[in-house]
Image: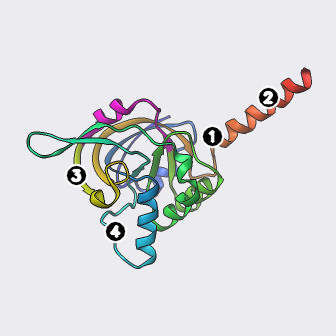
Amino acid sequence: MDYHLTTPIPPEELKKIRIGDIVYLTGTVVTARDEAHLKALELHKEGKELPVNFTGIGLFHCGPVMKKNVDDEWIVVAAGPTTSARMEIFQDEFIKVFHPGIIIGKGGMGEKTAKACQEETCIYGYFTGGAALLAADRIKKVRDVFWYEELGMPESLWVYEVEEFGPLTITIDTHGGNLTDESKKKIEENKNKILQEL
């Protein structure tokens, strides 16, 4: 099924979605890669407030290419997804602490993230790798940027307003489903069958 969601996404809407469904997202999406995840969690542990409220919004694993226009406003040149497996070691903690509605990236995520999504009502949406220009086209406004001076362009928190951002194929849902893990198991089963036949 196709779903058109608007941030902040209510938990009851997220619970309707199953692995294999397609999502188009409108509203707020914030980019965050390795360093941004670590910095956010560190600030939380120190009791400091973050510049962004992640509750119910889209968290995009992305290191975008940005530039300023003639009016000195940031615009998106390209916004391709980063491989999400890089964030697996701390994504579950991030979900538990900050409660994003949907994680967006490429390549899927593992068991720890899937468990956190089930417990905290979050989903993971796979965005096609190599579609950086498509992603940029769906970003309608750059609302803000944080930690740019400290972390640099690809690692900053870029706050975007998006419209019909997608298609995002849901590979982790709120019910414990993980399409990436299921696919790996099927591949392994098929490999074993082929080896036995040989």
Identify the mark nearer the N-term, 4 or 1: 4
Are the residues flagged by discs 3 and 1 in contact, CB closer than 8 Å?
no
Q: Nearer the viewer, residue 64 or 31?
A: 64
Q: Label 1: few (<14), some or many (≥20) within 10 Å?
A: many
Looking at the image, residue 41 lies above or below residue 30: below
Amino acid tagged 2:
Asn
Amino acid tagged 4:
Leu
| Residue 143 marker | 3
Residue 170 location (% of width, % of height):
52, 41
Q: Give the range drawn in magenta.
A: 125-140
Identify the mark nearer the N-term, 2 or 1: 1
Identify the mark nearer the N-term, 3 or 2: 3
| Residue 179 marker | 1
| Residue 50 marker | 4
Q: Distance between the residues labelled 2 and 4?
A: 46 Å
| Residue 71 marker | none
Dot 2 corresponds to which residue?
Answer: 190
Are the residues flagged by discs 4 and 3 in contact, CB closer than 8 Å?
no
Residue in view at x 38 percent, y 60 percent: 54
Are the residues flagged by discs 2 and 4 in contact, CB closer than 8 Å?
no
